[in-house]
Image (tube, rainbow, N blue to C red):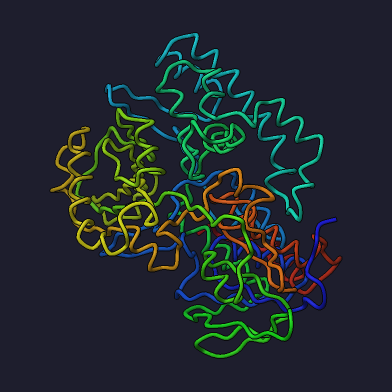
Amino acid sequence: MTRTVSGRTDHVVVVGAGLSGLAAALHLLGAGRRVTVVERDTSPGGRAGRVERNGYLIDTGPTVLTMPHLADEAFAAVGDSLRARVDLVPLHPAYRAGFADGSTLDVHTGAEAMEAEIERFAGAREAAGYRRLRAWLERLYRVQMRRFIDADFDSPLQLLHPDLARLAALGGFGRLDARIGRFLHDERLRRVFSFQSLYAGVAPERALAAYGVIAYMDTVAGVYFPRGGMHALPRAMADAAGDAGAELRFGETVTRLERSGERITGVVTDAGRIACDAVVLTPDLPVTYRLLGRAPRRAMGLRFSPSAVILHAGTDRTWPALAHHTISFGAAWKRTFTELTETGDLMSDPSLLITRPTATDPGLAPPGRHLHYILAPCPNTAIGPGAADWHDLAPRYRDRLLGELERRGLDGIASAVEEECLVTPADWQAQGHAAGSPFSAAHTFAQTGPFRPRNLVRGTANAVLAGCGTTPGVGVPTVLLSGKLAAARITGGTRPASTAGRRRAAARTSRERRPV
């Protein structure tokens, strides 16, 4: 049986109003707990924040939303609904992929549309391989989701389940790139279904094939965009939590935790003390462990994922070749991952993600203007340029990125920029992210599943962790699950038959609401 927090848990303080903290808050409220959410910023979101620059509404964090039903689970915990709060737009295509040879591929999540696109792009043999790959990804997801992803672990022995044998039979413990290669021979297509391993901080040729589940989320389950930007999701979650009775305290920084023996008895902020029966901690691992005054013992130190440079550019024009999400692949591939994860060099031939949210929601920019989010993976500060180095490097790298985009067909992009915001590993590190990476601990085998930093910490009886550094890992879907799993550590996964929060939620569902 999965361990839970012992003792009284009537009042829970959630530190951090990012996606994991808000998910935890909603699940706790649905289970009848009194919840206080403390957030250092003046608005919800955490990594999924918002910056406003002269009419441009800029999402500061993730731009890709998959598996929205996981967010809906959090809303449903208080009798609410994601679709009642957020206007979700399915993206068609989910991505557009551009390659160094000038070819392009639209990535559709519908089976028939994608099969036809692959046949046009690479021929009938590759289209048939895609059909087999899609079936494999679907089986991989079904085997992993409930047993290995949406699950708390107390011991590696919990892996000993028939689903482990099923995962092995699917080749889940082989290498991702090699497994994809069994279905697809075209190297360009193999990139489309394996680049997602970078989210996990591992090169495709070294990543476990089990991480193909991320490709399932991206290329099968569907990609969505909330009207109003990705920040609309945490804002709606915070509104739902507030309506269900949570106390939301923004603009307060947690400075320390008060203890009595092994129990946290109070959360102290720069505005005062909040007594509590339990606490959910969502900051990045170094910050959380500092607050707890202890870190788990590990034979080896944590290895962190690559980081990213992001250029948010508000422009006076756009380029028709761009979809909502466009992946611009360089000619290099294996060398790129070597640079990002081993040598610590900036990509010599970069692969870039360009998101154009105004393609779906023009209201995110002033009339006639456009917003572009340009993400360039880069080494973290532990193996690449340090935080201090980025002070001088940042403007030069910004110009280098724009120059590369000019060469790839975005003519005049440098002169089109009216407003911009550049984020580098130095900025991530200043926000408290270890090794200057917003993607936290890499998903190596030794940092996955029961071997990942656990959401319960030895020596503290009533503190639970949530966020991308703990179970189950990095990405919007998994971070939402981490909040749910953290709440289950406190509640045991049970809900009372009737609570004030659920009565309020039931009353709300009888009224019409407008989407944000």
Question: Is residue 419 found left or right of 168 in the rendered image?
Answer: left
Q: Name the residue nearer the viewer: 129 or 461.
A: 461
| Residue 58 position in % (x across, y down) | 35, 58
Q: Position of residue 158 (x, y in %)?
A: 79, 47
Q: Is residue 267 above or below residue 170?
A: below
Q: Residue at x 17, y 42 (%)?
A: 403
Q: Quadrant of the N terminus?
A: bottom right
Q: Is residue 76 above or below residue 430?
A: above
Left or right, residue 218 beside residue 257? left
Considering every residue shown, the one lying at the far top of the view is 124
Q: Quadrant of residue 52?
A: bottom left
Name the residue rendered at 35%, 55% in the picture: 364
Residue 455 pos. (x, y %): 67, 62
* Whole-percent x, y for residue 424 in the image: 32, 57
In this rendering, the answer to whether 120 lies above or below 288 is above
401 sits to left or right of 467: left
Front-lying residue, 21 or 437: 437
Tell me what residue is drawn at x 58 percent, y 37 percent. 211
Q: Residue furthest bottom?
A: 272
Q: How many marks?
A: 0
